[in-house]
Image (tube, rainbow, N blue to C red):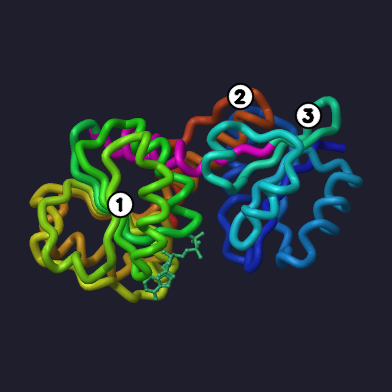
Amino acid sequence: MSDRYAVFGHPIGHSKSPRIHRLFAEQTGQDLQYDAWDVPAERFEAALAEFLATGGRGLNCTVPLKELAFHAAARLTDRARRACAVNTLALETDRKLVGDNTDGSGLLRDLRDNLGLRLEGKSILILGAGGAVRGILQPLLEANPGRLLIANRTAARAEQLAGEFAALGPVAACGFERLLAEAGFELILNATAASLSGQLPPLGDALLLPGGCCYALAYASAPTPFVEWGRNHGAALSVDGIGMLVEQAAEAFQLWRGVRPATAPVIRLLNAERGWS
Ligand code: ATR
């Protein structure tokens, strides 16, 4: 029987992870099975036990399970510990689970390697201050931006995060009300849970520097209002996180199988299938 892998989450019906990992397996000649399991939070422990008892070797965890996966890991990578969240679990030879978080490095690989952005010295704005933001702050600050502002509907959550990560770089926080007065960001990352449902925070017209980049961490079949906003406000690039999704998956695949798949053909295929160039 081939080694078993899976993504756990709830809802999980629209997850592209099985498709991506099967494409990786085909491309690298790895014999493995990868399935999507619909696992609400209250069933996480039982589902994990069942998965491991039936040959499970590695797991991706998505909403709402990343914190539970963090607590299920016997060992953690530094970046998972910093993120307080785990999106990848791997069963090691001693049958202990190691927890990693590949979201941040997936984002950085997409921004730098796929989209060709240089972050050093740049002004970056992040919308949102939830778990997704906690997972990307360390790699973003390690890229040495000139300024990183976290804006959140609930300002206190942004301030809490900025305080926690202050030692790593020039990070500040504010509430959404300040966004109408702010200007000149070269990169705006939308990491609010509302980015898919279409609600946009009040964004001033000068918020994005002409020729800058708008990037939504979530992905959708059609351009969201945030991606449209970027396109209408002079962005050279206004995209969603399909590349980040593929890159975080590649990093998990490498952890499990010791081989790094090529991501560009998979991103191209997924974009072609949804009609994005
Ligand atoms: P995730 O793991 O996706 O980051 P989360 O930790 O629940 O999820 O965080 C959700 C983020 O989306 C938060 O920044 C939240 O803002 P609050 O901290 O003010 O709740 C943001 N968010 C959710 N719904 C939103 C809405 N309708 N408008 C603006 N921001 C919203």
User: Which residue is labeled 1 in the image?
Assistant: 277
Q: CA distance from mark 1 to mark 2?
A: 28 Å
Q: Magenta segment range?
A: 99-119
Where 144 sits versus 19, above or below? above
Q: In terms of secondary structure, where does tag 1 sit?
A: loop
Q: Nearer the viewer, mark 2 or mark 3?
A: 3
In this rendering, would 132 be left or right of 159? right
Q: CA distance from mark 1 to mark 3?
A: 40 Å
Residue closest to the eye, 169 or 121:
169
Location of ligand 1 given as a quarter of the image: bottom left
Q: Residue 137 appears in which quarter of the rendering?
A: top left
Q: Residue at x 76, y 37 (%)?
A: 74
User: Which residue is labeled 2 in the image?
Assistant: 259
Q: Nearer the viewer, mark 1 or mark 3?
A: 3
Q: Residue at x 69, y 50 (%)?
A: 69
Where residue 189 appears, as percent x and y from the top left, is 31, 53
Where residue 257 appears, as percent x and y from the top left, is 68, 28
Density class for disc 3 (Cα within 10 Å; few <14, some 14-19, many ≥20) is few
Residue 103 inside the magenta-drawn segment: yes
Q: Earlier in the sequence, mark 2 or mark 3?
A: 3
Where residue 187 appears, as percent x and y from the top left, is 23, 48
Residue 276 in view (yes/no): no
Given contact means CB atoms under 8 Å apart, are the residues at marks 1 and 3 in contact?
no
Q: Residue 205 appears in which quarter of the rendering?
A: bottom left
Residue 92 - label: 3
Residue 249 - label: none
Q: What residue type is disc 1 on?
A: Ser
Q: Residue 159 appears in which quarter of the rendering?
A: bottom left
In this rendering, would 145 be left or right of 271? left
Residue 16 inside the magenta-drawn segment: no
Q: In terms of secondary structure, where does tag 2 sit?
A: loop
Q: What residue type is disc 2 on?
A: Val
